[in-house]
Image: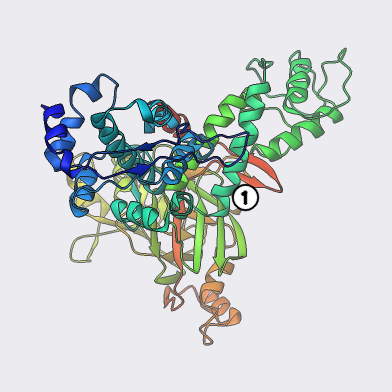
Amino acid sequence: MIKHRVYTLITFLIATLVFTSCKDNAEEPGIETSNNTETIGKLTDAEFISELFGDAAAAKNLSLQRRKEAAEFYSDRDFEPVWVNSGLRESLFRNIQNIDKDGLNPEDYNIQYLEESLSNLEDLNQEEKSRLEISLTDNFLQLAHDLYYGKLNPKELFEIWDLPKEDIDLAGILEEAINQDDIDAVLNSIKPDHPVYLGLKKSLAEYEKLNSEEKSITTIASGKTIKPDENDPRIPAIAKRLEEIGFSIEYDSLTNQNNKEIQEAIKEFQLQYGIHVDGVIGPGTISSLNKSSEDRYHQIMANMERWRWFPRDFGDHYILVNIPNYKLTVVRESDTISIHNVMVGTQARKTPVFSDEIEYVVYNPTWTIPPTIKKNDVIPGAAGDISYFKNKNLTIYDNDGQEVDPSAINFSSGEGMDYTYRQKAGSSNPLGQVKIIYPNEYLIYLHDTPSKALFERNSRAESSGCVRVQGAIELSKYLLKNRSQYSSEEIDEIIASGKTTQIEVTQQVKVHHLYWTSWRENGEARFTEDIYGTDQKIYNLLKE
């Protein structure tokens, strides 16, 4: 049927197309070896496209990944072929061939089929050439999609993922590439261009090389924490592993002591791999030491995929919270204004990944208990001890805003969920002296805390989802800097008064809660703990 259609439509074939080789240099010859004049069939209709990808294509494990977009693209062009320029074909093939440098898999874009077909053009019949034409389009569309949106759907991996991202017209992107005769420029234009992504690309190349050179690693057994100057039989293995990673140390192999030399090397290691720098060899340090170059390579790949999910434009003025690194950064017109340590949600109560815009700050805030804490903490606590509210300085309100006596509520039933629980402003209020609000359905915001010492901890995933900020008052003053009536001194007086005061933020400042566990710093790859355990999940799905 297909052959009959091809030959009966011979009058619609394009007269001739020159398939010339595209050779950039002697080391990387063009994939097309023939310089002969060839012809390719006109694609008559969408049905014809479907027929081309029937049993014959299936035998080659070839299918259309973006069938709808491809059919619409050709329909808009009256089914005229577009890959008539060998340079364009060569450029797309090279982009697919080298897409592993962006952490994607060339096999996802039919690299073997394209290589075989493009290098044997003169042997293809008309049907096979038409199939190649459509496959080039289909793989371009899929590649453009994955570079812009990511291969995976983040909403299937994160409980809450709500980041705005403008849609792009994939067919329009292809049209632009064809019209400009420049596949490279167009594909590069839709990749993330943030410095973190570009740094990850460098780190990926480094760890690919390290992985190829790494024969085996010394594995450290788990056990008790090894403090400075303590002896432990695992010290020789730790010293050897540090040397394997590239830390040069002078160490007496006859001793088991965590001496000064080991401590200094461990501190350097902890700095690079996002562990609290103290020279103590605890479970986190042991776990990180046991990660191979291949493990780190996979981690970098996962982070590159995340950055394809993120918005391309964060705005001119924004706050960036990197959840697993416990850091908040204020950025204005590409300049870093300040960096703050933060505390984020636990594994059970994760801080969501989303973006919003700051609207106001509240000094001496009251704390209205959010639904999750009300259900999991307050009501169970009250059911066991009615004095819970007095001890926690909590007041109960009904739907009319009237105060309710705790003894009038049966907390062993579901009745307790019908009330509002609020803690007054004061020294014991968990929000501290200020909260910074960007109204959202997740009831998440930035806030102060009375427990300043918590910021000194290594692991700071201890909140109920909101983000506690070290230096929150200074951050709030910065957000109100353009309002002359709220000087630093005036704000200090408002705080000292103890009165709850809400002030509008008139600067346009976005807040982005993001999640990434690797980046580049001072020319070296840096890592931190994957506190919500998504890196390996992402990598496993990428390689499927």
Please tell me in which quadrant of the rendered image residue 50 appears.
top left
Query: Which one is in front, 225 or 320?
Result: 320
Left or right of 324, for residue 248:
right
Q: Residue 145: give x, y in percent of width and height.
A: 35, 45
Asked if 216 appears above or below 16 in the picture, the reply is: above
Residue at the spot x=29%, y=33% of the render? 129
Asked if 68 appears above or below 53 in the picture, the reply is: below
Where, quadrant-wise, is the N terminus in this rendering? Answer: top left
Of helix, strand and loop, which one carries label 1? helix
Identify the colour scheme used: rainbow
Circle 1 crowding by C-alpha within 10 Å: few under 14, some 14–19, many from 20? few
Q: Residue 317: give x, y in percent of width and height.
A: 50, 69
Where, quadrant-wise, is the C terminus in this rendering? Answer: top left
Query: Which one is in front, 99 or 544?
Result: 99
* Residue kind at label 1, given as amino acid type: Ala
Instruction: Give the labeled residue for mark 1.
Output: 453
Q: Residue 94: give x, y in percent of width and height.
A: 49, 38
